[in-house]
Amino acid sequence: MTDSNQPLAGIVLCGGRSRRMGQSKALLPFGNETMLQRVIRIMSQVASPIVAVKAASQQLPAMPDNLLLTQDRDPDQGPLEGIRMGLAALKQSAPESSATYVTSCDVPLLQPGFVQAVASRLGNADAAVVVEDGFRHPLAAVYRTSVLPVIDSLLDAGKRRPLFLFEQVETVLVSTEELRGADPDLSSLANLNQPSDYLAALQKAGLEPDPQVLAEFNSFD
């Protein structure tokens, strides 16, 4: 379990280029809000404060007043750069937040209980990462801010894959079977990479796609 005196914070990465989606995932409508707004709202049920990590000059929808906002230093550095910037923002603005759940903005079916279940497995380790069919999900993981120097060393060495971090710090591997009690369909891992993923997630949530977005998808195809 994470220490109750060390509240869980959250980091949401939203600076990806969304090449396969054809438009900004952060701005895609999901019901009466955008995907980024939805993920931040869900995260805020179980984590505080929350940091959004964007790309330089990226446009974002309206954000909560208490949201912390930072950005990648360089483009196309991958998720480890975003994780690094989010952890650095927390260390500066909320030093009491030592454990942080990290997610992307394209998991609109994220379940609060899933986040809590992953965090509960951290114990005294440096990181806890969800493992699905042998794949470690760096954006379904809890990290301590104390791993920042290790991340900096890896990035300085050009090692931008989160796997390198998991190999260098004490990491708990959380199997998906351990998480089905909180999220039976593992919908929290359903990141949306292309239009078909997005439309399927809308349908699962019982929501209708925006006609304008559908038209844009058709033109993108």
Image (cartoon, rainbow, N blue to C red):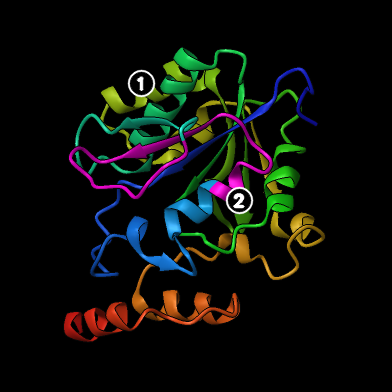
Answer whether residue 59 is magenta in the image. Answer: yes
Q: Secondary structure at mark 1?
A: helix
Which residue shows up at 53% across the image and 35% down it? 166
Q: From the viewer's perspective, is residue 29 above or below residue 101?
A: below
Answer whether residue 55 is magenta in the image. Answer: yes
Q: State the extent of the magenta-drawn residues as a range.
A: 41-64
Residue 138 shows in this picture: no
Q: Quadrant of residue 144?
A: top right
Amino acid, disc 1:
Asp
Q: Quadrant of residue 190?
A: bottom right
Q: As rendered, which of 38 and 85 lies closer to the eye?
A: 38
Is 171 on the left-hand or right-hand side of 158? Answer: right
Which residue is the site of mark 1?
152
Q: In the image, which disc is placed on residue 188?
A: none
Q: Quadrant of residue 170?
A: top right
Which residue is the site of mark 2?
42
Helix, strand or loop: magenta stretch: loop
Which residue shows up at 66% across the image and 65% down it? 186
Which residue shows up at 48% across the image and 65% down it? 32
Task: Give the percent coordinates (x, y) of residue 63.
Answer: 41, 42
Is 123 on the left-hand or right-hand side of 20? Answer: right
